[in-house]
Amino acid sequence: MKKLAFFDSGLGGLTVLHEALKQMPQEQYIYFADSDHAPYGTKSSAAIKALVFDVVDFLVQQDIKALVLACNTATSVVIKDLRQQYSIPIIGMEPAIKPAMELPSNKKTLVCATEKTLAENKLQLLIENLNATDKVERLSLQKLVSFAENFEFEGLKVHTYLSQSFSPINWVEFDSIVLGCTHFVYFKPLIKQLIPPHIHILDGNKGTIKHLQDRISLNTNGETFPIEFFSSKKPMPATHFAPCFTLLNQ
Ligand code: DGL
């Protein structure tokens, strides 16, 4: 039986893996956190490409049937090159702007992502293809990546950072916020407290797992397996990641 690999610059991709575990508990999972090199969002495209290829070279040797690049930033920069290089299905992340545009209230959406994702052409093309240029505002919440890597999912520092970042936003013009970075999903409860109740909070995790399911043959023999964790910051046992799952299970 072949495995499914999930890869992110650090802990963010666990939010996507968590969704996969809910929907496909009988698969065998590998998770790679490139925590020694997080954050990716402040690095150059060349640096991100080199890091991602190093990890994917390792992952494809682990008998995997598909790879989920559970990182919007890496997807923006390198997914095309990866698909040219490797023959297994490679599923990337896409900010959930399409579902935001389908909301009946027809107001603007605030796309929050890393500096790199916001600067990349891939996002611009997505917005243009959806004819959403006038309906999308962009906001970098890059610092949330470092907060998450330090397991600081709440508290005064994070609260202050988020409320200052949101202070210029005139929420009456908006109906949604898109979390375009997998690390940001941990902060959903806090974000909810800081924005008006009419704002929908959207992320791309469910959509990504749906794409994955369409591309693989599922394991049907009823077994479950422990997740194998790898990290560039060694050693990182499974217990290191436990607080993330605890938070996501709440
Ligand atoms: N989880 C990555 C993403 O979805 C975080 C990027 C970073 O490491 O800055 O974009």
Image: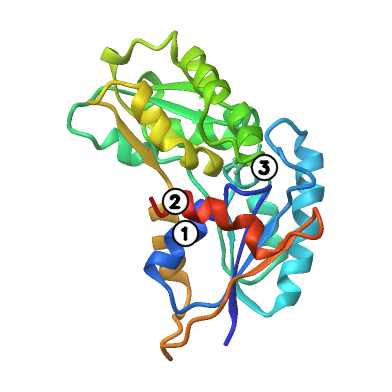
For the residue pair 167 and 213, the one nearer the viewer reads as 167
Q: Which mark is residue 73?
A: none
Q: Which numbered mark, 1 or 3, is in the foreground of this view?
A: 1
Instruction: Tell me the kind of residue under disc 1.
Output: His
Residue 39: x percent and y percent? 71, 37
Q: Residue at x 70, y 54 (%)?
A: 81
Q: Residue furthest left?
A: 104
**Residue 156 makes an appearance in the image:** yes
Q: Give residue 172's position: percent from left, percent from top.
A: 26, 13
Question: From the viewer's perspective, is the residue at label 2 or at label 3 nearer?
Answer: 2
- Tell me what residue is drawn at x 74 percent, y 59 percent: 236
Which residue is tagged 3? 77
Tell me if I can see residue 92 in this picture: no
Reading the image, the residue beneath label 1 is 18
Badge 1 marks a residue whose secondary structure is helix
Which of labels 1 and 2 is toward the front? Answer: 2
